[in-house]
Image: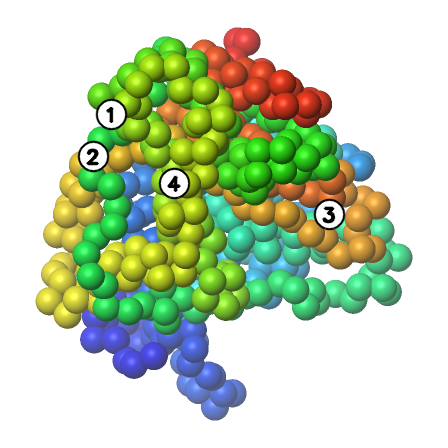
């Protein structure tokens, strides 16, 4: 990476703490203590601008163990892991023209017993400048990550390694089998894959028409209610095959239908019902980055009549998703976004002006989706650790215009769909579950109790 002309105040005032790119190699002969840095990726640039107590831009990934968590050993595991895991060992800084990540190097944040609602705002200054937190409750370990740091795949990488380090401390017999380093399947690559695969775009591909907005009475104190839907993966596959759909298409289609039936009451809406679906780009572009590398597509239902059947909605959603799931289309989406970042003249605009423009565009476009359903995939662990791990699940924070979101993940033979909602009414979740049961899937429900308070 070339030398950056946008020097931070620290660079100007204190040469002994010069900032250099992460890719730079250091030798023992270097006189100064260097703080490594890198710019935020294209997706990450939005999150620091819009983050607040109400729009936290965090997600949680949790692992359920088969034994209660020892918080002392969990802290030791985090202390051991963080210096090895560069993508999370950073703090957020800003220069005159851009935000950037700088190596943190401080003591790891304190592991705490969970005592608040999921996905609350991460106050970096109260967290040793780190952009993630680790909590525990009984047999569960949670990581909560500010989305500028990494997407779900990056979060899974970190949580999985944290659990491995913890289990080796708790069960020393694993140490001799697995060693003490990072596992071979864990990536700490910090490439900006958006820039690496960027091509000159043609035009914006995002929908501009406002979507149907899900409304209702909110939980008090803007709490996040969590409802987990657990099911057998084999039963889910059978139901999806019955409709000639992939699991992801089937779950998104069922979610769209649940909103249609419970909120629109099968009536015509002037605005389209649009559910955003993040797409992990790594397999399309052979990337192993631990940073953000995804784009949003949408499952859209435009109601031109009343009383769409379940089969009709599934068919519309499947066609909608398939029409967008090709490499060329996905490339055009993120290339358009990156083109603004790559524009020479826009790069010269001061950060405070960029921030005002970004926030204005975000607030105007926030009504483009009714909700989000994201699938972070099948979480795999190394064989020796499996006897100690029961399950994984994940949840997203809500955002402007989206008072409910859903997250999908699977582990072993279990599929979990977790709803994070600020709505007191759970009619959407119940409609979703009812449809799955009618398709022959046995369901187990779990909540954090907020809906009944």
Determine whether the residue tagged by mark 3 lies in a helix, strand or loop.
Answer: helix
Residue at the far right in the pictured view: 173
User: Is residue 19 rendered to the left or right of residue 241?
Assistant: left
- Tell me whether the residue at label 1 lies in contact with that at label 2, contact meaning CB atoms closer than 8 angstroms: yes
Q: Earlier in the sequence, mark 3 or mark 4?
A: 3
Kindly report the distance in space between the C-alpha atoms of the residues bearing marks 1 and 2.
Answer: 8 Å
Kindly report the distance in space between the C-alpha atoms of the residues bearing marks 3 and 4.
Answer: 48 Å
Kindly report the distance in space between the C-alpha atoms of the residues bearing marks 1 and 3.
Answer: 52 Å
The residue depicted at 24 percent of the width and 41 percent of the height is 207
Q: Is residue 355 visible?
A: yes
The label nearer to you, 2 versus 4, is 4
User: Is residue 224 rendered to the left or right of residue 270?
Assistant: right
Location of the N terminus by quadrant is bottom left
Kindly report the distance in space between the C-alpha atoms of the residues bearing marks 3 and 2.
Answer: 51 Å
Identify which residue, 113 or 62, lies in the foreground. 62
- Against 38, residue 281 (above or below) is above
The label nearer to you, 3 versus 2, is 2
Dot 4: within a 10 Å radius of its alpha carbon, few (fewer than 14), some, or many (20 or more) residues? some
């Amino acid at each position: 990476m070339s030398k950056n002309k946008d020097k931070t105040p620290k660079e100007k005032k204190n040469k002994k703490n010069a900032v250099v790119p992460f890719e730079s190699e250091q030798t023992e002969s270097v006189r100064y203590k260097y703080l490594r840095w890198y710019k935020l990726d294209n997706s990450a640039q939005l999150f620091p601008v819009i983050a607040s107590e109400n729009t936290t831009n965090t997600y949680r990934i949790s692992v359920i163990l088969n034994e209660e968590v020892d918080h002392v050993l969990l802290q030791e595991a985090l202390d051991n892991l963080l210096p090895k895991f560069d993508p999370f060992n950073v703090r957020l800084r800003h220069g005159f023209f851009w935000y950037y990540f700088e190596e943190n190097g401080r003591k790891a944040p304190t592991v705490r017993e969970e005592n608040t609602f999921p996905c609350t705002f991460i106050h970096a200054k109260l967290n040793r400048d780190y952009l993630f937190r680790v909590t525990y409750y009984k047999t569960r370990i949670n990581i909560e990550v500010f989305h500028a740091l990494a997407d779900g795949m990056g979060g899974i990488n970190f949580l999985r390694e944290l659990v491995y380090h913890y289990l080796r401390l708790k069960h020393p017999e694993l140490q001799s089998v697995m060693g003490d380093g990072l596992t071979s399947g864990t990536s700490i690559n910090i490439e900006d894959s958006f820039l690496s695969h960027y091509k000159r775009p043609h035009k914006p591909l995002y929908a501009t028409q406002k979507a149907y907005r899900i409304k209702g009475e909110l939980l008090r104190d803007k709490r996040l209610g969590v409802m987990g839907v657990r099911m057998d993966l084999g039963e889910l596959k059978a139901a999806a095959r019955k409709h000639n759909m992939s699991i992801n298409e089937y779950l998104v289609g069922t979610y769209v239908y649940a909103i249609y039936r419970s909120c629109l009451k099968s009536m015509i809406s002037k605005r389209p019902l649009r559910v955003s679906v993040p797409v992990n780009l790594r397999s399309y572009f052979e990337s192993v980055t631990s940073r953000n590398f995804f784009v949003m597509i949408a499952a859209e239902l435009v109601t031109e009549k009343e009383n769409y059947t379940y089969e009709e909605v599934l068919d519309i959603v499947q066609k909608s998703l398939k029409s967008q799931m090709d490499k060329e289309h996905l490339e055009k989406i993120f290339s358009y976004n990156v083109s603004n970042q790559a524009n020479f003249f826009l790069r010269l605009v001061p950060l405070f002006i960029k921030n005002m423009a970004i926030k204005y565009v975000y607030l105007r476009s926030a009504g483009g989706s009714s909700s989000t359903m994201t699938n972070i995939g099948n979480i795999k662990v190394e064989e020796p650790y499996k006897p100690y791990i029961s399950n994984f699940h994940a949840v997203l924070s809500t955002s402007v215009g989206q008072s409910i979101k859903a997250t999908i993940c699977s582990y072993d033979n279990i599929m979990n769909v977790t709803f994070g909602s600020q709505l007191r009414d759970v009619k959407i979740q119940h409609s979703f579950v009812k449809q799955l049961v009618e398709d022959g899937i046995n369901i187990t429900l779990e909540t954090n109790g907020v809906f009944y308070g």
